[in-house]
Image (spheres, rainbow, N blue to C red):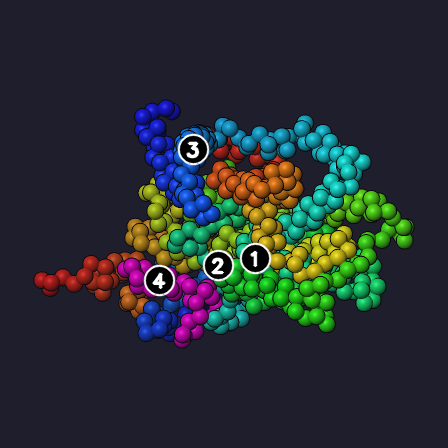
Amino acid sequence: MESILEVTGLTMDFGGLRALDHLDLDVKKGEIAALIGPNGAGKTTFFNCITGIYNPTGGDIIIRPPKGQGRKERINGIKPNHVTERGMARTFQNIRLFQNMSVLENVMIGRHCRTRTGVAGAMLRFRSTIEEEQAMVDYSYAIIEKIGLARFVNDLAKNLPYGAQRRLEIARAMATDPFLLLLDEPAAGMNPQETRELDGLINKIRDEENIAILLIEHDMKLVMSLSDRIFVMDYGRKIAQGGPDEIKRDPTVIKAYLGEDPDA
Amino acid sequence: MLSFAEIRRSVLVSAWFMFLTFPVMVIRVNPIEEVVEWRWRNLIMVGAGSFLISFVWRYLIARKERGKKAAEAGRAGGPPLARRAAVHAGFHKPLMGALAVFVLIFPFLFSTYQVNIMATALIYVMLGLGLNIVIGLAGLLDLGYVAFYAVGAYAYALLNHHFGLGFWAVLPIGAVMGATFGILLGFPVLRLRGDYLAIVTLGFGEIIRLVLENWNDFSFGPSGIANIDRPGFFGVEMSLEAATNYVYYLLIGLVLMTIFFVNRLQNSRIGRAWIALREDEIACQAMGIDKTKTKLTAFALGATWAGMAGVVFAAKTTFINPASFTFLESAIILSIVVLGGMGSIPGVIVGALVLILLPEYLRAFSDYRMLLFGAILVIMMVFRPEGLIAGARRVYEFKGKKETSDTADGIHT
C-alpha cells in the first residue's frame, strides 16, 4: 500500500524546548493509524505541525493525495486552510465547534473551501450561487444523516449533548472532503456506550467513505480494536511502532506508560 | 419574598448607600457664612430610595433567573412572543404592511423637525447595520468605525466643493472610498484580535479625525466645509421642507437596500465564514477558511456602508467639520449594535432608533437626560445582555424528513 502522508524527521522547538524530536510517521491509503503516548508526549503538537497551525523547525511533511496520480507535495509551513484544501481535515481535543451556529451551518462551513461564491454572488444571488448553496445544504445534510445527527440539524451546536458535539466535529471535518481525517482524542469524555458507537462510526468512515484516519487517543481498548498500526510517542520521540499485538507486548511502551519495574 | 433575610439585605444596601453619599448629599459647607449645613432630610431620602430600589432590583433578577430555569427545564415556551409575532405569517404580513404605511406617510403626519430627527436616526441605522457586519457577524471589535463615516462625508464635501460633483455621482464613490479605507485599515490589523484590535482601530479613527482637523489645505481644518449641495432630484428646486422629506425618503430607500444586502450576506457562504471567524478563529482556519480574505471582506463591506452614510450625512446637513466624527460617534454606533443585538438586523434597527430618538425625546428632562440614558443602558445590559432582539440562525426545512424531527422532541424532554 502506498502512503498518503509521509512525515520524516519532524522537529519542533519552542525556544529551548524540543517538543518533537525527529519524528517519522506515515499513513497508508485506507488505514486507521493511531498515535498514542503519555500526556505531554507531543501528540497534539504533531497534529498542529502537520495541519499548519505551527511551522515545524525541521523535517518534511509530504502528502500524496490519492486523487493526485501519485503527485507528491511538501506542505511544511503552509497555512491551515491550505492544508485543509489539499485534503487533510482535523478535529480538536477540546471541542472547537462554532457554538452559536446551527449543526447544519457548522457542517456547511466545512464545504467552504470546496465552493466559490464571492461577495457579489452573495449579494446578488446569481443562479449559480443559488444552485451552489442548495448543493452545499444537500451535501451537508447527507453527512449529518450519515453521522447520525439528523435530529439536531437546526439546533445550535452549543445545545448538543457532549457525545453529539464530538460527532459534529467529525462531520464538519468530513464535509471538507478529505483523504485523511486527523482525530484528536475523539473519545475523550465519552461514556462506554458512546465510545462503542464511535468505534463503529470510525470504521464506517474508513470503509464507506474511503478516508484514511490518523487518531490520537487515550482509550486503549478503542485504539487496539480500531487501529491497523500504532505509533507510540514519549518526550517528543517515537519509541515504538507496529500492530496492536506488537505494541501491547512492547517493553519500551509498557515502561513509558507504567514506569520501570524496580524488581527487574 | 418579604423574608427577614431579604429585609436585612436591603437595610444593609441602604445603609451602605447612605454612608457613600453622606459627604455629597448631607454635608454642605457654606463658605460665605462660614457654616456647615447638615441636610439630614437628604440622608433619609437616599436611604428610603435605595431600600426600595434594592427590593425591585432583586425581584427582577430573581424573575429573570426563574425564566432562565424554565427555559432550560423544557423548551415548551418556544421562542419569545415578539419573535413568534414577527415570524408567524398571520401577524407578519399585516404588521409589515402597517409599518410600511407608517414609514411612507411619516412626513405628512409630523413636523419637519421630527422628520429631520428620523432621518438622522436612519443614518445611524445604516451605520449600525454596517458595523454589525464587522462586529456582530465577524466579531472584530472596531472602535474606529466613525473614520469611514468621515471618509464618506469628506469625499462628498470635497468633490462637491472642488469639482461640483453631485450627490448621486459621489454616493458610489463614497462607498468605494469607504471600502478602500476599510482594506487599508484591515491589512495592518490582520494579526490582531480582541482588545489589541480595539486599540488599533481606535487609534485609526483618531488619526483620520486629527488629519482632517490639522491639514488645513486639504480639509479646511476645524472650520469645516459649508454650503454642500443637497441631494438633487432631476434638478428640481426644493423648499427646505421638501428637501428634508426628500432626504428622508432617500434614506428609507438606502436603509431598505442595506437590509436587503446585509440579510443576503449573512446567510451566504461569506456570512457564515464571518460568523465562524467570530466563533473560533483557529477552528475556522482549520476548516479551510482563508482568514485574511474573510477579515478584509468584513472590514471592506462594513466600511462601504459607513462611506455611503457619510455621503448622505454631508448632503443632509450641508455642513461638516471634524467635530462630527469624534470617538463618541464610534461609541454610539457600537452601543447601537450591542444594545440592539449583535448579528441581528431587526435588533440593530431598533437599537439605532432607541439610541438616537430617546435622547431627543428625553430633552424634556434636560438635566437628567444623560443620566436616564446611562441608566437605561446599564439596565438593558443586566437584563438582556444578548440585546433587544437577539440574532437567530436560519432554520432549514428538509422535506420528507419529518420523522427525524419528531424524535428530536423525545430527546429534549
- Which sits in the foreground, B235 or B129? B235
Q: Residue at x 56, y 57 (%)?
A: B143
Residue neighbourhood size for the residue with mark 1, other residues' Cα within 10 Å, grouped as few (<14), some (14–19), many (≥20): many
| Magenta span of residues | A36-65
Q: Amino acid at mark 4?
A: Lys
Disc 2 to disc 4, C-alpha distance? 32 Å
Q: In the image, is residue B394 above or below residue A9?
A: above
Q: Are marks 3 and 1 on the same chain?
A: yes
Which residue is tagged 4?
A: A43
Expressed as whole percent of the image width and height from the top left, the position of residue B258 reads 70, 49
The kind of secondary structure element at disc 3 is helix
Residue matched to label 2: B195
Q: Is residue A187 left or right of residue A205?
A: left
Going by the image, does A59 lie left or right of B223? left
Residue type at numbered disc 3: Arg
Q: Are marks 2 and 4 on the same chain?
A: no
Dividing the picture into quadrants, the one containing residue A161 is top left
